[in-house]
Image (spheres, rainbow, N blue to C red):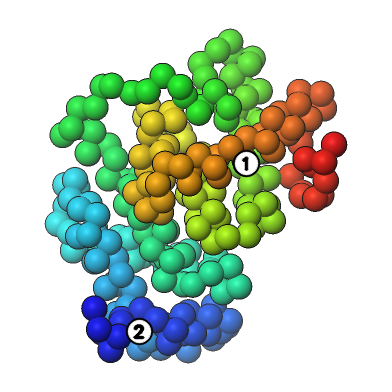
Amino acid sequence: MARGKIYFGQVTEDAIVEFNNETDARVRNTIYNERIRVPIEKLVENIIHTFKFYYFDVPSEDVKHEVVSNLVLNMHKYVQEKGKAFSYFSIVAKNYLILHNNNNYKKMKSHKEIGTADFERNIGREKEKDEQTEGVMEFTTQFCEFLENNISSIFHRKKDMDVAYSLLYLMQNRDNIENFNKKYLYLQIREMTRSNTQHITRVVTELKKYLNSLREEFRVGGQINTKFTGSLLDV
């Protein structure tokens, strides 16, 4: 694609920052309609067709409008210092589409063979005794909060943060996902971030260091400190 054909660049990113900083609803509406709407719609349209999100019961145009609405609702979460708007909204759109595309996809593909080494054993999806399951679910909720607060402190490369944020998104939506296991997670993260398995494994391995330390903290005290101290792994 020629440089002159870029549809979502710095101009759009600046408009999004301006949109988020603006308090007047009428001005925000003008900024969106004149400078953001077309690039956002084009981004979603390209993602739908590039990654072939076609397993919906409604036309692609309706899917596009639904995803665009979700992006607008999440626009205030974009922080310019954390990365490019194009990457952020691409990930949010792909996450949304993967989640809502998944059930229909499985009806058509009938995947039965799932890997046995479940990552869920580390983040609390096992079906054990009721009291254990309740405790694991509570730990998982607190661990997600820890990650949400600290991913940008744990990782400094954007490609690592993209993988970590994608994993966090899947963990937060685990109740809506069947077959929540290691194979599923790796497949979905690859789709979201275009990272290879080795890179995903490195990020997951780093997060497991925190997981193990925080799980012990939870076992002893019944809760974890979701604020990053910078010394968690030094003890």
Residue 67 to residue 226: above or below: below
- Is residue 135 found left or right of 20 in the rendered image? right
Image location (x, y in percent) of residue 67: 32, 60
Residue 40 to residue 99: above or below: below
Name of the residue lying farthest toward the top? 129
Q: Place residue 48 in its image quadrant.
A: bottom left
- Is residue 133 found left or right of 91 in the rendered image? right
Rendered residue at 53%/85% (across/down): 18
Q: Which tag is nearer the camera, tag 2 or tag 1?
A: 1
Rendered residue at 43%/28% (across/down): 181
Q: Amino acid at mark 1?
A: Glu
Image location (x, y in percent) of residue 55: 19, 45
**Quarter holding the N terminus?**
bottom left
Name of the residue lying farthest toward the front? 198
Mark 1: few/some/many CA within 10 Å (<14, 14-19, 20+): few
Image location (x, y in percent) of residue 180: 42, 30
Mark 2 and mark 1 lie on one chain; the one further toward the N terminus is 2
- Is residue 191 found left or right of 163 in the rendered image? left
Image location (x, y in percent) of residue 80: 56, 74
**Quarter holding the C terminus?**
top right
Residues 79 and 74: in front is 79
> Which residue in the structure is indicated by mark 1?
206
Q: Is residue 149 visible from the viewing direction of this image?
A: no
> Which residue in the structure is indicated by mark 2?
33
Rendered residue at 37%/53% (across/down): 194
Mark 1 residue element: helix
Q: Amino acid at mark 2?
A: Asn
Mark 2: few/some/many CA within 10 Å (<14, 14-19, 20+): few
- Is residue 138 found left or right of 96 in the rendered image? right
